Image (cartoon, helix red, strand yellow):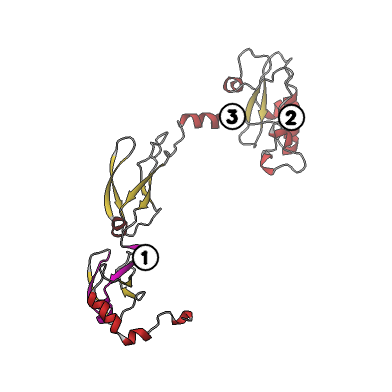
Amino acid sequence: MANDPYKTLGVAKIATQKEIQSAYRKLAKSCTRTSTRATKVPRIVSRRSPRPIRCWATRTSVPVSTRVRSMAREPNKPPRNYYREYAGAPGSDARYQNSSGFSDFTDTDDIFSSFFSRRDRGPMRAKGRDLQFSMEVNFLDAVNGSKEKITLPDGTVLDLQVPPGTQQGQTLRLRGKGDPGSGGGPAGDALIEIHVRPHPVFTRDGDDIRIEMPISLREAILGGKVNVPTVSGSVMLTLPPHSNTGKTLRLKGKGVAKRGGGNGDQYITLKIMLPDAADPELTAFATSWVAGQAHSPRRAWGD
């Protein structure tokens, strides 16, 4: 055959892989810059698919590699070290080894095929940047949930659903409301950090609600039904007789909605409050109350 690669290499068709590689290197090294023509150097990867590559010598056209990226070295500049120089060095990384056996040469077809295939795919898809905001909500709106209308800096008006049980510092996510993506990628998200305004009556303790409820001296002594505020509305509570300041009562299920279902509780701490104005009858009673003179609420202090 006129283009028989084995004949060009000067080896027999029954030559071993090692013999083929050795002949290939010798022929390739003979293609120097002083050659007068371009010599075809066959590359025999397997006996079924020999594929020639061209050794550029004195051709006037510019090779493809220099049109894509110039590899020429500037004067007085030290040469670069490429991974091929380390392929066989002791301790070198195995990922730099050439499985085909031709570790002295790179397959330029594969390099340029990868480069142009990436270019043809267009710009890389990337998600847009997330935008961060903060918003204040009322205590009861955070506990019970609410629908808030918000306006983004670009003027976009959105409806934000505040779920029941939202806590101080919790971040709510509006998907796709951030910066647009690039290369056809998805838009980023808008992240809304919630700040809960304090309430004059209620205090949150995890999933529970706590309040301090003032009661009169009569209610403390006699007990009775009292109206108690909760985060879901007022309820009637039976106050037991002889209720002291500091006594705590519980309303089961009147707290904050839990993520797994159900609600926390509400705890009511009692606080006896005397009338603002002095009451002559109350003063006369306390003066004549003999048992009261013997009672010492600070006995535990040694008084």
Q: Where is residue 292 in the image (x, y as percent from the top left)?
A: 33, 84
Circle 1 residues within 10 Å: few <14, some 14–19, many ≥20: some
Residue 16 at least partly seen = no
195 or 190: which is nearer to us? 195
Q: What range is drawn magenta here?
A: 202-230
Tell me the kind of residue under disc 1. Answer: Asp
SS assignment at label 3 = helix
Q: Would you say residue 204 sits in the magenta stretch?
A: yes
Circle 3 residues within 10 Å: few <14, some 14–19, many ≥20: few
Nearest to the eye among marks 3 and 1: give it. Answer: 1
- Dot 2 or dot 3: first in sequence order is 2
Whether residue 241 sits left or right of residue 132 in the image: it is left
The numbered dot on residue 109 is: 3
- Dot 3 or dot 1: first in sequence order is 3
The numbered dot on residue 25 is: 2
Tell me the distance, in whole angstroms, between the alpha carbons under discs 2 and 3: 19 Å
Q: Which residue lies furthest to the right in this view?
A: 90
| Residue 37 vertical position relative to residue 44 in the rendered view, above or below | above
Whether residue 185 sits left or right of residue 143 in the image: it is right
Nearest to the eye among marks 2 and 3: give it. Answer: 3
Q: In which quarter of the image is residue 77?
A: top right
Q: Position of residue 152 (x, y in %)?
A: 32, 39
| Residue 98 vertical position relative to residue 24 in the rendered view, above or below | below
What residue sits right under mark 1 in the picture? 207
Q: Would you say residue 216 sits in the magenta stretch?
A: yes
